[in-house]
Every structure is written in C-alpha cells, then in structure tokens.
C-alpha cells in the first residue's frame, strides 16, 4: 500500500463494514470522517510499510490488510475484502501475508468483528479467543475524578511506561496519531485513556482502581453525549462494573479479542481497534 491508495482504501473499508452491518442487522452508523481516517492510514503506511498491503483488480481496491509491529508485539489493525470478492480466498492470502509480517514476534493481537468467517480465520492462526461485550448509552451520575487531566504528546513517555506494564510493548507515536485525529488523551497518576467521537479508543492502567477512575473520566468528558465502550472481555470485569454503574447497556454480539504468545498482563486494558 502507498499513500496514493489511501482514498480508495477508505472508501472500500467503509463500504465493506456497511455491508457487514447490514448482513448482521446492525443499525447503520455514519461513515468515519475521511480526513481523520486518512491520518490513521497514512500513519500506518509510514510506520509499517511492509505490513500495509492492498489487493487490486479491474474495479480497484479488492482487499486491504494493515498489520503493525510495536517492539515484539504484532497486531492486525485491519483486514477487509470487498463484498463481491469475499469467500474467494483473497482474504486468506492477505491474512497470510500480514501474519508473515509478524514472524519472530513474541505476541500477537487481533480484534475481530462478529463476522463468523473472520473469527474462524483468526482461530485457525492458533490464537486464543476471548469473546467480548460492548457497552453504550448516555452515562448517568458520573463526575470527573480528581487527579485526571487532558494530556498531549509530552505525555507519550508516560503512556509507554503504562503500555510496557500492561501489554509488554509501547504504542509510541500511535498515541500521537490519535491526537492528530482529534481524539483526547486523559492522563491520571497511574494510567491513561484516549477518547473521541463518542467512543473509548484506548485505556491502560497499572491497577483496576486507576482504570476505573479513567473510565469514569471518559464518561464525564462525554457530558450529555452517548459513549461506546468496546472490547470488554471477561478479564476486564472492572470495566463492566463501571459501565453498569453509569447506566450503560451491555450487548454480547460484539466480536472477540484474539491473543497469542506473550502480550503481557493485558489487564486492566481496553485495546484500540486501530492500534491494538
């Protein structure tokens, strides 16, 4: 993939997820802002050129795989195949090549949509499956906890310390890319969270009490708006408790987190869909 592909990759990705939502009876969501989505793609093409792959046919982009490596951790940021090319073997080949980018990695992470074909493919890679729930709604009765402030790029060294404790590899300037995408970094004494566009994007902390306060800070930051918290596995009971406490609705058809090898404690941790 090159930077010239970014516009077409965004359009193909949006159309593919709209098709997935329609097939699963999910309510339609607004398409991501292209200007913000392009920052993500550009960042990954530059940081992981060997893991950024596209497949083309006479109609243009037929499939995309974006894989990242941070220190010794490999992750699959995106795998999509245009609906008319699904079940042709193209997705399997893209996944094989993306997985090759992880050769020698100490651990692997994939966040999967509810698509049964995707989950079957990831299970075949030998990763362990951790089913998820989502939480969404307008938080009620949540005040901003003491000691939490809005962060900046100057706080990336601190986020790296937390990442090393939680998953064994720092996100590094992936945090900077999220800030460039207009998301907000919240910093506490013992952890951090990234939030934006009505979603929790990433949360990591040294302990569950700190993680719980950061999640409450995300809810307070949302004000009267709704919020979505994804990728809550059975290892993140603290997150489920805080979501229920704030009156959010839990749903259990949210896909799964796949992990393999040494990915650290992976708790308390809510991973990023884009940056794992």
Image (cartoon, helix red, strand yellow):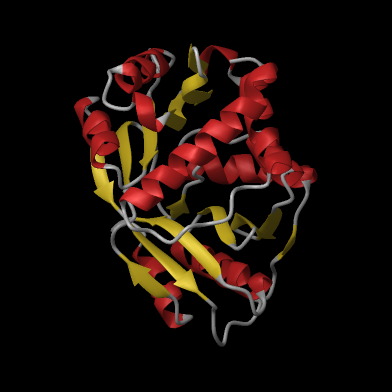
Viewer-proximal residue, 125 or 56? 56
Which of 212 and 223 lies nearest the eye of the viewer?
A: 223
**Residue 67 image point, x, y percent:** 48, 24
Q: Report if residue 206 is visible in the image.
A: yes
Please state if 87 lies on the left or on the right of 15 as rendered: left
Q: Which residue shows up at 59% across the image and 36% down it?
A: 171
Quarter that holds the N terminus: top right
What count of labels does the image hold?
0
Q: Is residue 170 visible?
A: no
Q: Position of residue 134 (x, y in %)?
A: 39, 62
Q: Is residue 42 above or below residue 203?
A: above
Residue at horizontal 40 percent and vertical 52 percent from the top: 267
Q: Residue at x 36, y 24 (%)?
A: 85
Q: Nearer the viewer, residue 104 or 265?
A: 104
Question: Where's residue 211, x and y in %?
Answer: 51, 63
Looking at this view, name the residue that lies furthest to the front.
Answer: 58
Q: Position of residue 118 (x, y in %)?
A: 29, 35
In the image, is residue 230 above or below residue 142? above
Q: Give the quadrant of residue 52.
A: top right
- Residue at (77%, 43%) from the top-left corner? 153
Relative side of 50 to 89, left or right: right
- In the rendered structure, the answer to whether residue 135 lies left or right of residue 38 reads left
Q: Is residue 182 above or below residue 249?
A: above
């Amino acid at each position: 993939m090159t930077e010239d592909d970014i516009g077409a990759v965004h359009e193909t990705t949006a159309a593919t997820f709209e098709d997935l939502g329609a097939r699963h009876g999910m309510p339609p969501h607004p398409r991501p802002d292209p200007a913000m989505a392009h920052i993500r793609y550009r960042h990954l093409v530059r940081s992981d050129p060997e893991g950024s792959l596209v497949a083309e046919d006479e109609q243009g982009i037929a499939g995309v795989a974006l894989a990242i490596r941070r220190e010794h951790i490999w992750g699959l940021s995106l795998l999509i195949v245009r609906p008319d090319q699904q079940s042709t073997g193209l997705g399997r080949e893209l996944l094989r090549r993306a997985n090759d980018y992880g050769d020698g990695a100490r651990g692997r992470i994939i966040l999967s949509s509810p698509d049964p074909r995707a989950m079957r493919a990831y299970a075949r890679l030998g990763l362990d499956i951790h089913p998820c729930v989502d939480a969404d709604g307008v938080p009620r009765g949540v005040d901003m906890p003491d000691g939490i402030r809005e962060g900046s790029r100057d706080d990336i060294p601190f986020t790296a310390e937390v990442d090393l404790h939680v998953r064994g590899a720092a996100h590094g300037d992936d945090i900077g890319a999220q800030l460039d995408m207009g998301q907000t970094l919240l910093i506490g004494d013992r952890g951090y969270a990234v939030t934006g566009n009505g979603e929790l994007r990433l949360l990591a902390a040294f302990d569950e009490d700190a993680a719980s306060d950061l999640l409450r800070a995300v809810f307070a930051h949302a004000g009267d708006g709704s919020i979505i918290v994804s990728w809550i596995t059975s290892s993140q009971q603290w997150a489920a408790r805080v979501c229920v406490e704030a009156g959010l609705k839990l749903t259990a058809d949210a896909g799964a987190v796949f992990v393999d090898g040494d990915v650290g404690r992976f708790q308390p941790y809510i991973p990023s869909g884009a940056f794992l």
